[in-house]
Image (spheres, helix red, strand yellow):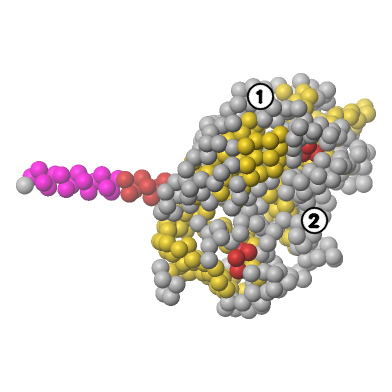
Amino acid sequence: MINKKIYKYVAFLIAYLVLTIYSQAFAQVADQSFCNPLNLNYRFSYDNSASFREAADPVIHRYKNKYFLYASKSGGYWHSDDMVKWTFMPSTTLPVEDYAPTVETIRDTVFFIASSERPKIYYNTNPLEDKWKIYNSAFPISMIDPALFKDDDGRVYFYYGCSNKEPIKGIELDSHHLLDTIGKPNTLIEHHAKEYGWEEFGEKNQEGQEGWNEGSWMTKYKNKYYLQYASPGTQFKVYADGVYISDKPLGPFTYMPNSPFSYKPGGFVNGAGHGCTFQDKQGNYWHVATMSISVKHMFERRIGLFPAFFDAEGQLHCNTAFGDYPLSIPNRKMNYDKESILPKWMLLSFNKPSSASSSLEGHRPEQAFDEDIRSSWSAATGNKGEWLQFDMQKKCSLYAIQVNFADEGSKLKAKDSFKPYQYIISASDDGKHWRTIVDKSANTADISHDYIVLPKVAQARYVKISNLQVPDGYFSISGFRIFGKGNSALPASVKTANIQRDAVDSRHAKLTWSPVKEATGYVVYFGTEKNKLYHSAMVYDNHSLELTGLNKDVPYFFRIDAFNESGITEGKQF
Protein backbone atom coordinates (compact mmCIF):
# COMPACT_ATOMS: atom_id res chain seq x y z
CA MET A 1 0.00 0.00 0.00
CA ILE A 2 2.82 2.34 0.92
CA ASN A 3 4.60 1.55 -2.32
CA LYS A 4 1.47 2.37 -4.32
CA LYS A 5 1.08 5.69 -2.51
CA ILE A 6 4.72 6.55 -3.13
CA TYR A 7 4.37 5.53 -6.78
CA LYS A 8 1.30 7.74 -7.25
CA TYR A 9 3.00 10.66 -5.52
CA VAL A 10 6.15 10.33 -7.64
CA ALA A 11 4.08 9.99 -10.81
CA PHE A 12 2.08 13.10 -9.88
CA LEU A 13 5.26 15.02 -9.09
CA ILE A 14 6.87 14.08 -12.42
CA ALA A 15 3.73 15.04 -14.34
CA TYR A 16 3.57 18.35 -12.50
CA LEU A 17 7.21 19.14 -13.22
CA VAL A 18 6.86 18.23 -16.90
CA LEU A 19 3.74 20.40 -17.21
CA THR A 20 5.47 23.30 -15.45
CA ILE A 21 8.56 23.09 -17.63
CA TYR A 22 6.41 22.86 -20.78
CA SER A 23 4.30 25.84 -19.71
CA GLN A 24 7.37 27.92 -18.93
CA ALA A 25 8.97 26.98 -22.25
CA PHE A 26 5.80 27.86 -24.14
CA ALA A 27 5.50 31.17 -22.28
CA GLN A 28 9.13 32.01 -23.05
CA VAL A 29 8.67 31.35 -26.77
CA ALA A 30 5.38 33.22 -26.70
CA ASP A 31 6.94 36.27 -25.06
CA GLN A 32 9.89 36.33 -27.43
CA SER A 33 8.46 35.40 -30.82
CA PHE A 34 7.67 37.58 -33.82
CA CYS A 35 6.48 37.03 -37.38
CA ASN A 36 7.52 38.93 -40.50
CA PRO A 37 6.49 41.45 -41.66
CA LEU A 38 7.21 43.06 -38.30
CA ASN A 39 4.13 44.01 -36.30
CA LEU A 40 4.45 47.81 -36.58
CA ASN A 41 2.18 50.80 -37.20
CA TYR A 42 3.04 51.17 -40.89
CA ARG A 43 1.97 54.67 -41.80
CA PHE A 44 -0.11 55.63 -44.82
CA SER A 45 1.86 57.55 -47.45
CA TYR A 46 1.52 61.20 -48.42
CA ASP A 47 1.59 60.09 -52.07
CA ASN A 48 -1.51 61.34 -53.92
CA SER A 49 -1.53 58.56 -56.54
CA ALA A 50 -2.77 55.85 -54.16
CA SER A 51 -3.55 55.03 -50.54
CA PHE A 52 -0.91 52.63 -49.25
CA ARG A 53 1.24 51.99 -46.20
CA GLU A 54 4.99 52.30 -46.39
CA ALA A 55 8.13 51.65 -44.37
CA ALA A 56 11.47 50.63 -45.85
CA ASP A 57 15.26 50.99 -45.77
CA PRO A 58 15.42 50.07 -42.07
CA VAL A 59 18.23 50.60 -39.59
CA ILE A 60 18.18 49.02 -36.12
CA HIS A 61 20.60 50.82 -33.84
CA ARG A 62 21.54 49.85 -30.27
CA TYR A 63 22.01 52.78 -27.93
CA LYS A 64 22.34 52.52 -24.14
CA ASN A 65 20.86 49.02 -24.05
CA LYS A 66 17.83 49.89 -26.14
CA TYR A 67 17.02 49.16 -29.77
CA PHE A 68 15.97 52.00 -32.07
CA LEU A 69 14.39 51.31 -35.46
CA TYR A 70 14.49 54.00 -38.15
CA ALA A 71 12.77 53.60 -41.54
CA SER A 72 11.86 55.71 -44.55
CA LYS A 73 8.70 57.81 -44.60
CA SER A 74 7.49 56.65 -41.18
CA GLY A 75 6.81 59.95 -39.46
CA GLY A 76 9.12 59.04 -36.60
CA TYR A 77 10.94 55.98 -35.28
CA TRP A 78 10.51 53.08 -32.84
CA HIS A 79 12.29 51.86 -29.73
CA SER A 80 12.28 48.52 -27.96
CA ASP A 81 13.87 46.62 -25.08
CA ASP A 82 13.60 43.20 -26.73
CA MET A 83 13.02 43.63 -30.51
CA VAL A 84 9.54 42.11 -30.08
CA LYS A 85 7.45 44.96 -28.69
CA TRP A 86 8.14 48.25 -30.44
CA THR A 87 6.97 51.67 -29.24
CA PHE A 88 6.52 54.34 -31.89
CA MET A 89 7.76 57.86 -31.26
CA PRO A 90 6.61 60.52 -33.75
CA SER A 91 9.21 63.14 -34.56
CA THR A 92 8.91 66.78 -35.52
CA THR A 93 12.61 67.58 -35.15
CA LEU A 94 13.95 65.09 -37.75
CA PRO A 95 13.38 65.01 -41.54
CA VAL A 96 11.27 61.84 -41.20
CA GLU A 97 9.76 62.29 -44.69
CA ASP A 98 13.15 61.70 -46.31
CA TYR A 99 14.25 58.29 -47.56
CA ALA A 100 16.84 55.92 -46.11
CA PRO A 101 17.79 57.32 -42.71
CA THR A 102 21.06 56.24 -41.11
CA VAL A 103 22.38 56.72 -37.58
CA GLU A 104 25.64 56.15 -35.74
CA THR A 105 26.91 56.69 -32.20
CA ILE A 106 29.98 58.90 -31.90
CA ARG A 107 31.24 59.75 -28.39
CA ASP A 108 27.89 58.84 -26.75
CA THR A 109 25.94 61.01 -29.19
CA VAL A 110 23.61 59.68 -31.88
CA PHE A 111 24.02 61.28 -35.30
CA PHE A 112 21.33 61.08 -38.00
CA ILE A 113 21.30 61.83 -41.73
CA ALA A 114 18.88 60.92 -44.53
CA SER A 115 18.74 61.16 -48.33
CA SER A 116 18.57 64.72 -49.57
CA GLU A 117 19.84 67.15 -52.19
CA ARG A 118 20.69 69.49 -49.31
CA PRO A 119 21.31 67.14 -46.39
CA LYS A 120 21.69 68.13 -42.78
CA ILE A 121 23.25 66.11 -39.97
CA TYR A 122 21.30 65.92 -36.71
CA TYR A 123 22.34 64.81 -33.22
CA ASN A 124 20.73 63.73 -29.97
CA THR A 125 22.10 62.48 -26.65
CA ASN A 126 18.76 60.95 -25.69
CA PRO A 127 16.77 59.59 -28.66
CA LEU A 128 13.94 58.64 -26.28
CA GLU A 129 13.12 62.34 -26.51
CA ASP A 130 12.28 64.10 -29.77
CA LYS A 131 14.85 66.82 -29.22
CA TRP A 132 17.12 66.39 -32.21
CA LYS A 133 19.29 69.38 -33.13
CA ILE A 134 21.19 70.31 -36.26
CA TYR A 135 24.91 69.52 -36.06
CA ASN A 136 25.87 70.34 -39.64
CA SER A 137 23.42 72.45 -41.66
CA ALA A 138 25.27 72.10 -44.97
CA PHE A 139 26.64 68.59 -45.42
CA PRO A 140 28.49 68.88 -48.75
CA ILE A 141 27.35 65.67 -50.51
CA SER A 142 23.98 65.59 -52.28
CA MET A 143 23.06 61.91 -52.21
CA ILE A 144 20.55 59.06 -51.81
CA ASP A 145 20.82 56.14 -49.39
CA PRO A 146 23.48 57.25 -46.91
CA ALA A 147 25.25 55.04 -44.37
CA LEU A 148 27.36 56.23 -41.43
CA PHE A 149 30.04 53.99 -39.95
CA LYS A 150 32.37 54.61 -36.99
CA ASP A 151 35.47 52.43 -36.91
CA ASP A 152 37.07 51.05 -33.73
CA ASP A 153 39.74 53.75 -33.85
CA GLY A 154 37.10 56.52 -33.80
CA ARG A 155 37.41 57.47 -37.46
CA VAL A 156 34.10 57.89 -39.29
CA TYR A 157 33.17 56.93 -42.84
CA PHE A 158 30.24 57.65 -45.10
CA TYR A 159 28.83 55.43 -47.87
CA TYR A 160 26.13 56.32 -50.36
CA GLY A 161 24.59 55.69 -53.78
CA CYS A 162 21.31 54.72 -55.46
CA SER A 163 21.52 54.30 -59.23
CA ASN A 164 21.37 51.87 -62.14
CA LYS A 165 24.46 53.57 -63.57
CA GLU A 166 26.49 55.28 -60.85
CA PRO A 167 28.57 53.26 -58.35
CA ILE A 168 28.36 53.00 -54.59
CA LYS A 169 30.87 55.50 -53.16
CA GLY A 170 32.55 56.13 -49.84
CA ILE A 171 34.48 58.90 -48.10
CA GLU A 172 35.98 59.62 -44.68
CA LEU A 173 34.34 62.22 -42.43
CA ASP A 174 35.98 64.52 -39.89
CA SER A 175 34.74 63.20 -36.54
CA HIS A 176 36.01 66.33 -34.76
CA HIS A 177 34.61 68.99 -37.08
CA LEU A 178 30.94 68.82 -38.10
CA LEU A 179 31.43 65.44 -39.81
CA ASP A 180 32.66 67.32 -42.86
CA THR A 181 34.17 65.30 -45.69
CA ILE A 182 37.90 64.55 -45.90
CA GLY A 183 39.33 64.28 -49.39
CA LYS A 184 37.36 63.03 -52.37
CA PRO A 185 34.84 60.16 -52.63
CA ASN A 186 36.14 56.70 -53.59
CA THR A 187 34.33 54.46 -56.06
CA LEU A 188 33.69 51.22 -54.19
CA ILE A 189 31.04 49.07 -55.94
CA GLU A 190 30.33 49.11 -59.67
CA HIS A 191 27.48 47.38 -61.56
CA HIS A 192 28.00 43.79 -62.71
CA ALA A 193 24.62 42.37 -63.72
CA LYS A 194 26.13 40.28 -66.52
CA GLU A 195 28.22 38.41 -63.94
CA TYR A 196 25.95 38.61 -60.89
CA GLY A 197 22.48 37.57 -62.01
CA TRP A 198 20.71 38.92 -58.92
CA GLU A 199 21.72 42.48 -59.91
CA GLU A 200 19.80 42.30 -63.21
CA PHE A 201 16.65 44.43 -63.22
CA GLY A 202 13.21 42.78 -63.16
CA GLU A 203 10.88 40.61 -61.11
CA LYS A 204 12.81 37.57 -62.31
CA ASN A 205 16.08 39.34 -63.18
CA GLN A 206 14.98 39.11 -66.79
CA GLU A 207 15.00 42.60 -68.31
CA GLY A 208 18.59 42.69 -69.57
CA GLN A 209 19.42 45.92 -67.71
CA GLU A 210 21.52 46.86 -64.73
CA GLY A 211 19.56 46.96 -61.50
CA TRP A 212 19.56 49.76 -58.97
CA ASN A 213 22.55 49.27 -56.69
CA GLU A 214 21.67 51.10 -53.49
CA GLY A 215 21.22 50.93 -49.74
CA SER A 216 24.82 50.50 -48.60
CA TRP A 217 25.71 49.42 -45.06
CA MET A 218 29.04 48.68 -43.37
CA THR A 219 29.76 46.00 -40.76
CA LYS A 220 33.19 45.28 -39.29
CA TYR A 221 34.00 41.74 -38.19
CA LYS A 222 37.41 40.44 -37.11
CA ASN A 223 39.23 43.36 -38.75
CA LYS A 224 37.45 42.84 -42.07
CA TYR A 225 35.06 45.39 -43.57
CA TYR A 226 31.80 44.10 -45.06
CA LEU A 227 30.22 46.65 -47.40
CA GLN A 228 26.64 45.58 -48.09
CA TYR A 229 24.36 46.87 -50.83
CA ALA A 230 20.96 46.15 -52.37
CA SER A 231 19.78 45.32 -55.89
CA PRO A 232 17.96 45.16 -58.36
CA GLY A 233 14.89 47.17 -57.24
CA THR A 234 12.82 47.61 -54.11
CA GLN A 235 9.56 46.61 -55.85
CA PHE A 236 10.72 43.13 -56.81
CA LYS A 237 10.42 39.80 -54.99
CA VAL A 238 14.11 39.23 -55.72
CA TYR A 239 15.24 42.42 -53.91
CA ALA A 240 18.31 41.33 -51.97
CA ASP A 241 21.53 42.40 -50.27
CA GLY A 242 25.00 41.43 -51.44
CA VAL A 243 28.38 42.13 -49.87
CA TYR A 244 31.98 43.06 -50.69
CA ILE A 245 34.92 42.55 -48.27
CA SER A 246 38.07 44.56 -47.66
CA ASP A 247 40.91 44.99 -45.18
CA LYS A 248 40.28 48.74 -45.22
CA PRO A 249 37.10 50.82 -44.77
CA LEU A 250 37.51 52.47 -48.20
CA GLY A 251 38.74 49.40 -50.05
CA PRO A 252 39.69 48.05 -52.40
CA PHE A 253 36.80 45.61 -52.00
CA THR A 254 36.39 42.02 -53.22
CA TYR A 255 32.99 40.56 -54.10
CA MET A 256 31.76 37.75 -51.82
CA PRO A 257 30.69 34.99 -54.25
CA ASN A 258 27.87 33.77 -52.00
CA SER A 259 26.08 37.10 -52.62
CA PRO A 260 23.30 37.93 -52.28
CA PHE A 261 23.67 36.90 -48.66
CA SER A 262 20.18 38.22 -47.77
CA TYR A 263 17.61 36.85 -50.24
CA LYS A 264 13.96 35.82 -49.96
CA PRO A 265 12.23 35.28 -53.32
CA GLY A 266 9.55 32.82 -52.12
CA GLY A 267 6.93 32.37 -49.42
CA PHE A 268 4.18 34.64 -48.13
CA VAL A 269 6.09 37.93 -48.31
CA ASN A 270 9.22 38.49 -50.39
CA GLY A 271 12.30 40.65 -50.53
CA ALA A 272 15.20 41.03 -48.09
CA GLY A 273 17.14 44.01 -49.43
CA HIS A 274 18.32 47.47 -48.33
CA GLY A 275 18.82 46.71 -44.69
CA CYS A 276 21.45 46.70 -41.99
CA THR A 277 23.37 44.07 -40.06
CA PHE A 278 23.70 44.57 -36.31
CA GLN A 279 24.28 42.73 -33.02
CA ASP A 280 21.73 42.21 -30.26
CA LYS A 281 22.44 42.37 -26.53
CA GLN A 282 23.56 38.73 -26.47
CA GLY A 283 26.01 39.24 -29.33
CA ASN A 284 23.87 37.58 -32.01
CA TYR A 285 23.88 39.14 -35.46
CA TRP A 286 20.65 40.10 -37.24
CA HIS A 287 19.79 41.56 -40.61
CA VAL A 288 16.79 43.87 -40.84
CA ALA A 289 15.62 44.48 -44.40
CA THR A 290 12.96 45.80 -46.79
CA MET A 291 10.16 43.47 -47.92
CA SER A 292 7.92 44.12 -50.91
CA ILE A 293 4.15 44.17 -51.36
CA SER A 294 4.14 46.70 -54.23
CA VAL A 295 0.50 46.20 -55.25
CA LYS A 296 -1.07 49.60 -54.68
CA HIS A 297 2.24 51.34 -55.36
CA MET A 298 5.81 50.21 -56.02
CA PHE A 299 6.82 51.71 -52.68
CA GLU A 300 4.23 49.71 -50.70
CA ARG A 301 6.80 48.00 -48.47
CA ARG A 302 7.32 46.44 -45.07
CA ILE A 303 10.16 45.48 -42.71
CA GLY A 304 11.55 42.01 -42.02
CA LEU A 305 14.05 40.74 -39.46
CA PHE A 306 16.29 37.68 -40.00
CA PRO A 307 19.13 35.94 -38.12
CA ALA A 308 22.60 36.49 -39.59
CA PHE A 309 26.07 35.16 -38.83
CA PHE A 310 29.67 34.95 -39.99
CA ASP A 311 30.98 31.44 -40.63
CA ALA A 312 34.44 30.11 -39.76
CA GLU A 313 35.84 31.43 -43.05
CA GLY A 314 34.43 34.89 -42.39
CA GLN A 315 31.59 34.77 -44.92
CA LEU A 316 28.45 36.67 -43.99
CA HIS A 317 25.18 34.74 -44.16
CA CYS A 318 21.53 35.59 -43.50
CA ASN A 319 18.97 32.84 -42.89
CA THR A 320 15.59 33.69 -44.46
CA ALA A 321 14.26 30.10 -44.57
CA PHE A 322 10.75 30.08 -43.08
CA GLY A 323 11.40 33.79 -42.65
CA ASP A 324 7.68 34.64 -42.60
CA TYR A 325 6.82 31.97 -40.00
CA PRO A 326 7.00 32.69 -36.25
CA LEU A 327 10.60 33.14 -35.13
CA SER A 328 11.92 33.47 -31.59
CA ILE A 329 14.24 36.08 -30.14
CA PRO A 330 16.83 34.09 -28.13
CA ASN A 331 17.95 35.23 -24.70
CA ARG A 332 21.46 33.81 -25.11
CA LYS A 333 24.31 33.73 -27.60
CA MET A 334 23.36 31.44 -30.48
CA ASN A 335 25.27 29.52 -33.12
CA TYR A 336 23.01 30.24 -36.11
CA ASP A 337 25.18 27.97 -38.24
CA LYS A 338 23.84 25.02 -36.25
CA GLU A 339 20.89 26.32 -34.20
CA SER A 340 17.44 27.37 -35.36
CA ILE A 341 15.14 30.04 -33.95
CA LEU A 342 12.00 28.47 -35.42
CA PRO A 343 9.61 27.74 -32.51
CA LYS A 344 8.40 24.63 -34.38
CA TRP A 345 4.97 26.05 -35.20
CA MET A 346 3.94 25.22 -38.73
CA LEU A 347 1.35 26.84 -40.98
CA LEU A 348 -2.11 25.26 -40.68
CA SER A 349 -4.12 27.53 -42.98
CA PHE A 350 -2.62 27.08 -46.45
CA ASN A 351 -5.24 26.50 -49.18
CA LYS A 352 -7.91 25.30 -46.75
CA PRO A 353 -11.63 25.44 -47.68
CA SER A 354 -12.91 28.91 -46.87
CA SER A 355 -16.05 31.03 -46.94
CA ALA A 356 -17.01 34.62 -46.20
CA SER A 357 -19.95 36.89 -45.49
CA SER A 358 -19.40 38.61 -48.86
CA SER A 359 -16.65 39.13 -51.43
CA LEU A 360 -15.55 41.83 -53.83
CA GLU A 361 -14.95 40.75 -57.41
CA GLY A 362 -11.37 39.58 -57.78
CA HIS A 363 -10.92 39.18 -54.02
CA ARG A 364 -12.21 35.69 -53.21
CA PRO A 365 -11.99 34.08 -49.73
CA GLU A 366 -9.31 31.60 -50.82
CA GLN A 367 -6.98 34.50 -51.61
CA ALA A 368 -6.50 35.05 -47.88
CA PHE A 369 -5.07 31.51 -47.61
CA ASP A 370 -2.86 31.23 -50.73
CA GLU A 371 0.36 32.37 -48.99
CA ASP A 372 0.77 35.40 -51.22
CA ILE A 373 0.67 38.83 -49.59
CA ARG A 374 0.04 40.35 -53.02
CA SER A 375 -3.41 38.77 -53.26
CA SER A 376 -6.24 39.34 -50.81
CA TRP A 377 -9.83 38.62 -49.88
CA SER A 378 -12.09 41.60 -49.42
CA ALA A 379 -15.62 41.83 -48.11
CA ALA A 380 -18.04 43.97 -50.08
CA THR A 381 -18.18 46.48 -47.22
CA GLY A 382 -16.30 47.57 -44.13
CA ASN A 383 -19.37 47.07 -41.97
CA LYS A 384 -19.41 45.42 -38.59
CA GLY A 385 -20.28 41.75 -38.95
CA GLU A 386 -18.39 40.93 -42.14
CA TRP A 387 -16.51 37.67 -41.60
CA LEU A 388 -14.05 35.19 -43.08
CA GLN A 389 -13.58 31.59 -41.96
CA PHE A 390 -11.79 28.41 -42.96
CA ASP A 391 -11.84 24.70 -42.22
CA MET A 392 -8.60 22.91 -41.27
CA GLN A 393 -10.48 19.65 -42.00
CA LYS A 394 -9.38 18.12 -38.70
CA LYS A 395 -8.80 19.31 -35.18
CA CYS A 396 -5.38 20.94 -34.72
CA SER A 397 -3.41 22.65 -31.97
CA LEU A 398 -3.34 26.43 -32.51
CA TYR A 399 -0.45 28.43 -31.05
CA ALA A 400 -0.29 31.73 -32.94
CA ILE A 401 -2.18 33.81 -35.50
CA GLN A 402 -1.06 36.49 -37.94
CA VAL A 403 -3.72 38.77 -39.47
CA ASN A 404 -2.47 40.76 -42.45
CA PHE A 405 -4.95 43.47 -43.39
CA ALA A 406 -5.04 44.64 -47.01
CA ASP A 407 -6.64 48.11 -46.65
CA GLU A 408 -8.71 47.48 -49.79
CA GLY A 409 -10.72 50.54 -50.81
CA SER A 410 -8.87 52.82 -48.40
CA LYS A 411 -8.39 56.47 -49.33
CA LEU A 412 -6.40 57.40 -46.24
CA LYS A 413 -3.23 59.53 -46.36
CA ALA A 414 -0.53 60.18 -43.81
CA LYS A 415 -2.16 63.34 -42.51
CA ASP A 416 -5.56 61.70 -41.87
CA SER A 417 -6.73 60.55 -38.47
CA PHE A 418 -8.59 57.23 -38.35
CA LYS A 419 -9.75 54.46 -36.08
CA PRO A 420 -7.72 51.22 -35.93
CA TYR A 421 -8.81 47.73 -36.88
CA GLN A 422 -10.99 45.97 -34.33
CA TYR A 423 -12.05 42.36 -34.68
CA ILE A 424 -12.76 39.04 -32.96
CA ILE A 425 -11.34 35.62 -33.82
CA SER A 426 -13.41 32.56 -32.92
CA ALA A 427 -12.75 28.82 -33.02
CA SER A 428 -15.06 25.88 -33.41
CA ASP A 429 -15.02 22.10 -33.53
CA ASP A 430 -18.08 21.76 -35.76
CA GLY A 431 -18.50 25.11 -37.57
CA LYS A 432 -21.67 25.86 -35.59
CA HIS A 433 -20.71 26.48 -31.99
CA TRP A 434 -18.04 29.17 -31.63
CA ARG A 435 -15.81 30.34 -28.78
CA THR A 436 -13.71 33.52 -28.80
CA ILE A 437 -9.94 32.98 -28.76
CA VAL A 438 -8.83 36.53 -29.69
CA ASP A 439 -10.75 39.65 -28.68
CA LYS A 440 -9.53 42.87 -30.26
CA SER A 441 -12.81 44.71 -29.75
CA ALA A 442 -11.06 47.37 -27.67
CA ASN A 443 -7.91 47.61 -29.78
CA THR A 444 -6.43 51.11 -30.04
CA ALA A 445 -3.18 50.25 -31.88
CA ASP A 446 -2.74 50.95 -35.58
CA ILE A 447 -1.37 47.57 -36.62
CA SER A 448 -1.91 46.07 -40.06
CA HIS A 449 0.10 42.85 -39.58
CA ASP A 450 -1.22 41.82 -36.20
CA TYR A 451 0.62 38.87 -34.66
CA ILE A 452 -0.97 37.16 -31.67
CA VAL A 453 0.46 34.32 -29.61
CA LEU A 454 -2.46 32.63 -27.88
CA PRO A 455 -2.24 32.68 -24.06
CA LYS A 456 -2.95 28.95 -24.11
CA VAL A 457 -3.02 26.37 -26.87
CA ALA A 458 -6.42 26.16 -28.59
CA GLN A 459 -7.82 22.97 -30.06
CA ALA A 460 -10.11 23.58 -33.03
CA ARG A 461 -11.03 22.63 -36.59
CA TYR A 462 -12.62 25.88 -37.77
CA VAL A 463 -11.38 29.46 -37.30
CA LYS A 464 -13.31 32.67 -38.07
CA ILE A 465 -12.44 36.37 -37.99
CA SER A 466 -15.30 38.86 -37.61
CA ASN A 467 -15.04 42.56 -38.32
CA LEU A 468 -15.94 45.22 -35.78
CA GLN A 469 -14.20 48.26 -37.29
CA VAL A 470 -11.89 49.17 -40.19
CA PRO A 471 -9.84 52.36 -40.63
CA ASP A 472 -11.38 52.98 -44.06
CA GLY A 473 -12.61 51.08 -47.09
CA TYR A 474 -13.46 47.39 -46.86
CA PHE A 475 -12.72 44.62 -44.40
CA SER A 476 -9.91 42.90 -46.33
CA ILE A 477 -7.16 40.41 -45.52
CA SER A 478 -4.11 39.39 -47.54
CA GLY A 479 -3.17 36.60 -45.16
CA PHE A 480 -5.19 34.98 -42.36
CA ARG A 481 -2.42 32.72 -41.12
CA ILE A 482 -2.74 30.14 -38.33
CA PHE A 483 0.35 28.47 -36.83
CA GLY A 484 0.48 25.40 -34.66
CA LYS A 485 0.86 21.65 -34.85
CA GLY A 486 -0.98 19.36 -37.23
CA ASN A 487 -1.74 15.70 -36.79
CA SER A 488 -0.38 14.25 -40.03
CA ALA A 489 2.78 12.25 -40.54
CA LEU A 490 5.93 14.09 -41.56
CA PRO A 491 6.51 14.27 -45.32
CA ALA A 492 8.88 11.89 -47.05
CA SER A 493 12.41 13.01 -47.93
CA VAL A 494 13.28 14.46 -51.34
CA LYS A 495 16.11 12.21 -52.50
CA THR A 496 16.29 12.91 -56.24
CA ALA A 497 16.16 16.10 -58.29
CA ASN A 498 16.94 17.24 -61.81
CA ILE A 499 19.16 20.34 -61.78
CA GLN A 500 19.75 22.08 -65.10
CA ARG A 501 22.24 24.96 -65.13
CA ASP A 502 21.77 27.04 -68.28
CA ALA A 503 24.66 26.20 -70.61
CA VAL A 504 24.55 29.63 -72.27
CA ASP A 505 23.86 31.73 -69.17
CA SER A 506 25.04 30.04 -65.97
CA ARG A 507 23.30 32.73 -63.90
CA HIS A 508 20.13 30.70 -64.47
CA ALA A 509 19.19 27.25 -63.21
CA LYS A 510 16.03 25.15 -63.08
CA LEU A 511 15.28 22.48 -60.49
CA THR A 512 12.56 19.87 -60.77
CA TRP A 513 11.74 17.01 -58.43
CA SER A 514 9.02 14.44 -57.87
CA PRO A 515 6.40 15.29 -55.25
CA VAL A 516 6.72 13.40 -51.98
CA LYS A 517 3.92 12.09 -49.83
CA GLU A 518 2.33 14.39 -47.24
CA ALA A 519 4.26 17.51 -48.39
CA THR A 520 2.56 20.92 -48.28
CA GLY A 521 5.57 22.64 -49.80
CA TYR A 522 9.32 22.67 -50.14
CA VAL A 523 12.28 24.85 -49.21
CA VAL A 524 15.08 24.76 -51.77
CA TYR A 525 18.41 25.48 -50.07
CA PHE A 526 21.47 26.36 -52.11
CA GLY A 527 24.95 27.73 -51.67
CA THR A 528 28.37 28.04 -53.23
CA GLU A 529 30.00 25.43 -50.98
CA LYS A 530 29.00 21.96 -49.80
CA ASN A 531 27.24 22.00 -46.44
CA LYS A 532 26.87 25.80 -46.60
CA LEU A 533 23.43 26.02 -48.12
CA TYR A 534 22.26 29.26 -46.54
CA HIS A 535 20.28 30.68 -49.48
CA SER A 536 16.70 29.47 -49.73
CA ALA A 537 13.48 29.76 -51.68
CA MET A 538 10.11 28.47 -50.48
CA VAL A 539 7.77 26.73 -52.93
CA TYR A 540 4.11 25.88 -52.29
CA ASP A 541 2.06 23.49 -54.40
CA ASN A 542 4.80 23.09 -56.99
CA HIS A 543 7.68 20.76 -57.76
CA SER A 544 9.99 23.05 -59.67
CA LEU A 545 11.94 26.26 -59.16
CA GLU A 546 13.72 28.63 -61.50
CA LEU A 547 16.68 30.51 -60.06
CA THR A 548 17.67 33.53 -62.13
CA GLY A 549 19.98 35.37 -59.73
CA LEU A 550 23.02 33.10 -59.54
CA ASN A 551 26.59 34.24 -60.00
CA LYS A 552 28.13 33.43 -63.36
CA ASP A 553 30.53 30.45 -63.48
CA VAL A 554 30.25 29.87 -59.72
CA PRO A 555 29.41 26.28 -58.62
CA TYR A 556 26.26 25.75 -56.53
CA PHE A 557 25.02 22.95 -54.33
CA PHE A 558 21.39 22.22 -53.47
CA ARG A 559 19.06 20.50 -51.02
CA ILE A 560 15.26 20.29 -51.06
CA ASP A 561 13.47 19.96 -47.72
CA ALA A 562 9.80 18.97 -47.64
CA PHE A 563 7.43 20.38 -45.03
CA ASN A 564 3.82 20.14 -43.92
CA GLU A 565 1.68 21.06 -40.91
CA SER A 566 3.56 18.66 -38.65
CA GLY A 567 7.13 19.62 -39.44
CA ILE A 568 10.10 19.48 -41.81
CA THR A 569 11.95 16.57 -43.41
CA GLU A 570 15.47 17.25 -44.63
CA GLY A 571 16.32 16.16 -48.16
CA LYS A 572 19.48 14.88 -49.78
CA GLN A 573 22.20 17.34 -50.84
CA PHE A 574 22.89 17.55 -54.58
Q: Residue at x 63, y 64 (%)?
A: 367
Q: Which residue ends up furthest to the left in the rendered image?
A: 1
Q: Position of residue 419 (x, y in %)?
A: 66, 71
Label 2, label 1: how far apart the Cα atoms are? 35 Å
Question: Can you give x and y, in whole percent of width and height, for residue 130 in the image?
Answer: 74, 52
> Residue at left 72%, top 52%?
292
Q: Earlier in the sequence, mark 2 or mark 1?
A: 2
Name the residue that disc number 1 marks: 314
- Looking at the rendered image, the disc whose residue lies closer to the viewer, 2 or 1, is 2
Task: Identify the magenta region.
Answer: 2-17
Task: Name the spot of residue 412 as percent of width and height, x first.
Answer: 76, 69
The answer to whether residue 172 is visible is yes
Q: Which mark is residue 484?
A: none
The kind of secondary structure element at disc 2 is loop
Of the 4 image quadrants, the one containing the C terminus is top right
Residue that numbered label 2 is attached to: 298
Q: Where is residue 21 shown, x and y percent of the image?
A: 36, 45
Q: Quadrant of residue 358?
A: bottom right
Say which amino acid is labelled 2.
Met
User: Is residue 14 one of those drawn in magenta?
Assistant: yes
Label 2 Cα crowd, 10 Å radius (few <14 / some 14-19 / many 20+): some
Q: Amino acid at mark 1?
A: Gly
Please give the name of the residue rendered at 66% of the width and 78% of the height, measured from the top-left corner. Answer: 381
Dividing the picture into quarters, in which one does residue 422 lie?
Answer: bottom right
Q: Looking at the image, is 207 positioned above or below residue 148?
A: below
In-image side of 492 versus 159 (left or right): left
Question: Left or right: 133 with respect to 525?
Answer: right
**Residue drawn at (92%, 46%) of the image:** 118
